[in-house]
Image (cartoon, rainbow, N blue to C red):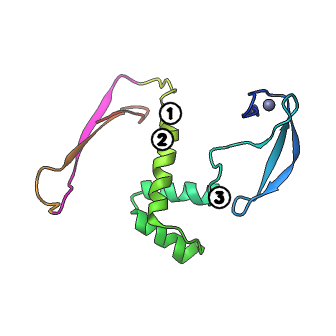
Amino acid sequence: MEMQIKCPKCKGTKVVKRGVSPTQNRGKQQIYLCKPCKKTFIQDLGFWKMKNNEQVVTKAIDLYFSNLSSRKVRNHYRRHEGIKTSHVSVLDWCRKYVLKVTKFVETLKPELSGELYVDETDIPRGYNTKKKGGDKFWCSVDWRTRYINATL
Ligand SMILES: [Zn+2]
C-alpha cells in the first residue's frame, strides 16, 4: 500500500526527502521537505514521540490482550529484554492504540453472514470478587467471519 506523504502545515503533497534524523529508541527517521511552504517534517506513523520502538509497544499490547496482566508484561520486558518500562506505560499504550484502532475499525463495512453468536461473561470487581453483582460483558460475533460486531 503506497502512502501519500502530506505536509502537516499546508497539507500539500509536493514533498521531497531531506536526510534522516536519529532518534534515541526508534532508529533513523526520514525527514521530508515540503516544496511550496518549505516546512521540514517527519511523518507520524502513529509512534510519534514514543520513547519505545514500534516492536516493543505492539508486542506489549499483544501480550496484554493475550491475557497477561500489565505487571506481567512489565516483568517480561525487565527479565528477558532488558527494557525498563512500567505497568502503567503498558496500560497507556493499550488505551492509546485501542482508541486509534477503534477509529479505523468504525470505517470498515464488514460482510456478515446474518448469523450471530452472542455470549455473556461475568466480570467480578471490588474487594470480594466471589460476591455477585459485578459487571457483565456481552459480545456478539458473526458466526462465519468471527467479526465482533457488537459489545455491551
Ligand atoms: Zn507544506
- The image shows residue 5 at horizontal and vertical percentages of 76, 34
User: Which three-letter amino acid code belongs to the residue tagged 1?
Assistant: Lys
Is residue 141 toward the left or the right of residue 87 in the image? Answer: left
How far across and down, in percent of the image, does residue 54 sit? 63, 54
Task: Determine whether the residue tagged by mark 2 lies in a helix, strand or loop.
Answer: helix
Residue 99 shows which numbered tag? 2
Q: CA distance from mark 2 to mark 1?
A: 6 Å
Q: Nearer the viewer, residue 10 or 61?
A: 10
The label shown at residue 119 is none
Magenta span of residues: 113-127
Confirm or reject: label 3 Cβ below 8 Å from ligand 1. no
Amino acid beneath label 3: Asn
- Which residue matches tag 3? 53
- Disc 1 crowd rating (10 Å Cα; few below 14, some 14-19, many 20+) is few
Circle 1 residue: 103
Q: Which one is nearer the viewer's eye here, 137 or 31?
A: 31
Q: Secondary structure at mark 1?
A: helix
**Residue type for callout 2:** Leu
Tell me, yes or no, whether the highlighted magenta stretch contains residue 84. no
CB under 8 Å between discs 2 and 1: yes
Q: Residue at x 17, y 60 (%)?
A: 129
The quadrant in which the N terminus is found is top right
Residue 29 at x, y percent in the picture? 77, 52
* Quadrant field for ligand 1: top right
